[in-house]
Amino acid sequence: MAQQSFLSEILARVAGAGRSRSEAPADVPARLISLCHSLIHDRSEAAGLMISRQILDIYAAAKSDTQATFFSALSQEFGPDDDALSAIIRSWKPGNIEVARALHFAAEPQTQELIRTINRVPGATAELVAMRADLLTHAKRNPKLGGLDADFQHLFASWFNRGFLEMRQIDWSTPAQILEKIITYEAVHEIADWDDLRQRVGDPDRMLFAFFHPAMPDDPLIFVEVALLSEVPKAIGPILASEHEQTDPETATVATFYSISNCHVGLRGVSFGNFLIKQVVAELQKLRPNLKTFVTLSPVPGLRRWVVQSLESGDPLLSATEKAALQALGEDERPHDDIAAKLAAKFLTRAKRASGTAADPVAHFHLGNGATLLGVHPSADLSLRGLGNSWGVMVNYLYDGNAIEQNHEAYASNYDISVSPSVIAMNKG
């Protein structure tokens, strides 16, 4: 206990020194890189904690251009140990498992060990997630930072493994600091105020579930909002309305996932949503055995962008009738509901990325999790965002426990999409 207090005092002193240090901006990247080299080569635990804390504090105060210079130097100077790697390569022979294992570890970039070491500092995990969010911004302008980002993502995929995550139901008794973050992180349907939030987490026919990590216990990683209903919804307005007609949760038969929000840019590429949905379904089945149908009411964020690109390229997926109708639209006009629905059906089932996956990211997520594209609904989201993304079109994805694994395998293996008969009929022409 005395040792812990001593280390805490030392860390506090170093943190204060890091924050108060006055350096010319040009000196900061070099200072950070110097500290990183010291951290890699210093085997003292106490010194490592102090240096790590100093790195985090100096970085937190750095400006964007300083961050970019630091990341560039980090990616160049902290690769594998060339001498050790060369020596193991020379000794490797086919079938030698132990040497192959040693080769694997020798080939690991030193950036991974650096990140792991920094993470030993209390509270560092959240700071490293924020650091990666900065890195992603800079990597857009500097593709050479892709390797460094891969190191972060590799480690985060391990640290944020499903086995470490805790699912919690968020309700009106949840601590205020977490509720405030729910308001901030909502990425699909903005939470207007505390009354709006109270409705989403406090009404008897509304529920919210989130994943948390032990290293970030008061900061959700991802959350899903659920509406308990008597039928599959065709529009978001009635769900979000402040005066919505409540459904008795004891008689509700449909659970609708109407908003899924990833909370941290720095965890992009680390999958949580598929686990969360499956666990929420299992929890709801236990809490409310009367629930029989599990669906989403999902946006189609890429629809309008795809239509514009298809018109410009003369994409044969668009019929002559659709092209004529689209070209006749005024700047603030939207296509007739029938045309908008058909366009969405084509986009979701026939527009593919080069890899063969669905072009729409939301579709790719749900289809990859084994869902079925159940229904397409025009004029379902008339908010500015909904109109801007998809002329207001929303869709239902059905999670049918009897078909999820089969659907997942078909999509993962051949990119085959499970589609309801109604959507198939809509998709003709």
Image: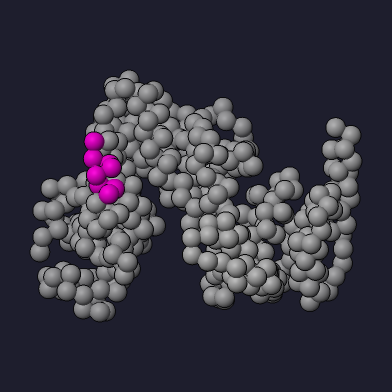
Quadrant of the frame with the C terminus: bottom left
Q: Look at the image and give the residue range highlighted in magenta.
A: 402-409
- Residue at image position (55%, 42%) is 220
Q: Nearer the viewer, residue 155 or 100?
A: 100
In the rendered image, the vertical position of residue 197 relative to residue 70, given as above or below: above
In the rendered image, the vertical position of residue 233 relative to residue 77, given as above or below: above
Name the chief secondary structure element in magenta.
helix
Q: Nearer the viewer, residue 368 or 325?
A: 368
Q: Position of residue 92 (x, y in %)?
A: 56, 66
In the rendered image, the vertical position of residue 15 relative to residue 199, given as above or below: below
Residue 401 in sight from this viewpoint = yes
- Residue at image position (48%, 60%) is 95
Quadrant of the frame with the N terminus: top right
Q: Is residue 343 left or right of residue 87?
A: left
Q: Position of residue 298 (x, y in %)?
A: 33, 49
Q: Is residue 415 left or right of residue 209?
A: left
